[in-house]
Image (spheres, grey):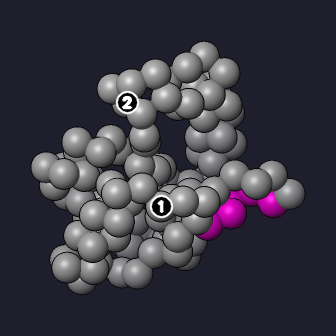
């Protein structure tokens, strides 16, 4: 899949903060082709950078939104903690802070 500008920025932020390396485009539910944008499989943690939040993109239309719900519900049932963030959250650092908090919390429990 093509990496978005927001995903590139988020990857840079993770590296700059020296957070643990993530796996990119991690397939979490074979044989389904569902992927996480960023994943830490040992912690069962993931971050999805949602595109098209201010336009009529795939994730904000009915069918795409429903498919996303199916994916995230399956991930939750399988024990994954998934953060969904927007491009604006990546730009203002909110996504990075939430990710840092999630990874810290999960390190203590897993």
Residue at 54% across, 59% down: 2
Q: Main secondary structure of the magenta part?
A: loop
**Label 1–label 2 contact, CB within 8 A:** no
Res 105 seen here:
no
- Is residue 72 placed above or below 98 in the rendered structure? above
Label 2, residues with CA under 10 Å away: few <14, some 14-19, many ≥20: some
Q: Which residues are magenta?
A: 26-30
Q: Nearer the viewer, residue 5 or 86?
A: 5
For mark 1, what is the residue? 3
Q: Nearer the viewer, residue 90 or 104?
A: 90
Residue at 42% across, 40% down: 51
Residue at 61% across, 66% down: 26
Q: Earlier in the sequence, mark 1 or mark 2?
A: 1
For mark 2, what is the residue? 53
x and y percentages locating residue 48 in the rendered image: 46, 50
Whether residue 38 sits left or right of residue 108 in the image: it is right
Q: Spot the residue most to the top.
A: 62
Whether residue 84 sits left or right of residue 40 in the image: it is left
x and y percentages locating residue 59 in the rendered image: 52, 31
- Is residue 27 placed above or below 76 in the rendered structure? below
Q: Secondary structure at mark 2?
A: loop
x and y percentages locating residue 29 in the rendered image: 75, 56
Residue at 28% across, 64% down: 9
> Is residue 29 found inside the magenta-colored segment of the image?
yes
- The quadrant the N terminus occupies is bottom right
- Is residue 90 placed above or below 55 in the rendered structure? below
Q: Secondary structure at mark 1?
A: loop
Task: Give the Cα separation between the discs numbered 1 and 2.
Answer: 16 Å
Q: Nearer the viewer, residue 103 or 48?
A: 48
């Amino acid at each position: 899949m093509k990496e978005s500008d927001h995903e590139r920025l988020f990857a840079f932020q993770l590296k700059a903060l020296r957070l643990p390396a993530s796996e990119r485009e991690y397939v979490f539910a074979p044989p389904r082709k569902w992927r996480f944008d960023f994943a830490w499989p040992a912690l069962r943690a993931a971050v999805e950078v949602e595109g098209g939040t201010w336009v009529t993109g795939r994730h904000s239309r009915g069918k795409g939104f429903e498919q996303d719900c199916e994916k995230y519900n399956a991930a939750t049932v399988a024990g994954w903690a998934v953060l969904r963030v927007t491009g604006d959250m990546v730009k203002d650092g909110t996504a990075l802070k939430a990710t840092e908090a999630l990874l810290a919390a999960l390190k203590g429990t897993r």
